[in-house]
Amino acid sequence: MLNQAGFEVLPGNRERNYWNASELIAELEGCVAVVAGSEPYTVEVLDALPELRVIARTGVGFDAIDLAACAERNVVVTTTPGVNHHAVAEHAIALLMGVARGFPDRDRLVREGNWQRFNTPRVMGSTLGLVGLGRIGRATAQRGIGLGMRVLGFDPFADADEMRKLGIELVTLDELFGQSDYVSLHLPATAETKHFINAETLAQMKPGSVLINTARGSLVDENALVESLKSGHLRGAGLDVFEKEPLPLDSPLLSVDRILLCGHLAGLDEESQRDTLTMAAETIIDLHKGGWPEFCIQSKNASGWSWAR
């Protein structure tokens, strides 16, 4: 699509570490647009790329992008809403079911030749608490209900009638933490949500419960989570995202067996990959032609923006 629209498309070099500013700058030198992942776009990176016009982020998160710096430099930031919520919901349930049935411990024990038997609570009949009821939260609720779970939800912006029709019980945050056997996070990363899960909120969670995070790593105080797991207050956790990515090999998270880990891949399945890349390409092409696909644009104060500077 981009080639047909007159762009020269450069494939990304996967051997480079895009979380290293100098390597990201070298990769994007001379580019006017980038189909971006979760790598950071900082002032340093933006200043070194004066020709950049568009950062088209695949997915809905853009916390790794300095929006204010982009606005000052006339760079438009876009996302691809509505294309990966089913993938993330399936991934959240996969982590939930894995931890619920004793993974990764069961796998590790077999590999060690330790044929150990231990039981775990049944998922059907348990309670799933969803913090955030946007597209992903609602899609996760649908799957939880299909597993026979009671689903609680907290979201101050949720429509009560709509949630009732979906089978989601709206409750206070305290009620959700106190009653849920599994708490799944579906919040954006903002200054207000940083370390939303911390020593205090972990203490409010039901003893023996499980934390699932497929949203953003900054939502969780990882040291506090490790302590809660080591103390036995939490039974386990399933994490797809981390405060620092890629996850450092000296992270305390790696010292706890009862954490199921994945490398920020929740939104990635074949269908979402196709749809998100298509939307990113369409957005870049539309902007180049003078359009303004507002549904996808996250930039603030971008009125009067034009491709030409």
Image (tube, rainbow, N blue to C red):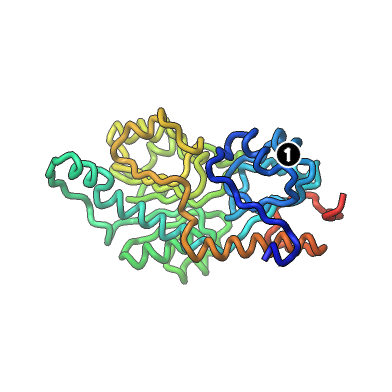
Q: In this image, 23 relative to 212: left or right?
A: right
Residue 12 drawn at (x, y percent)? 60, 49
- Quarter-of-image position of residue 282: bottom right
Res 174 visible: no
Q: Is residue 128 above or below residue 286?
A: above
- Report the residue marked by disc 1: 46
Q: Secondary structure at mark 1?
A: helix
* Three-letter code, disc 1: Leu
Residue 198 drawn at (x, y percent)? 45, 35
Of 157 and 247, the residue lying toward us: 247
Q: What residue appears at the point 68 percent right and 44 percent down from the top-left corner?
A: 28
Residue 141 drawn at (x, y percent)? 42, 62
Of 57 and 138, the residue lying toward us: 57
Res 153 visible: yes
Q: What residue appears at the point 62 percent right and 40 percent down from the top-left corner?
A: 40
Q: What residue appears at the point 67 percent right and 56 percent down from the top-left corner?
A: 9
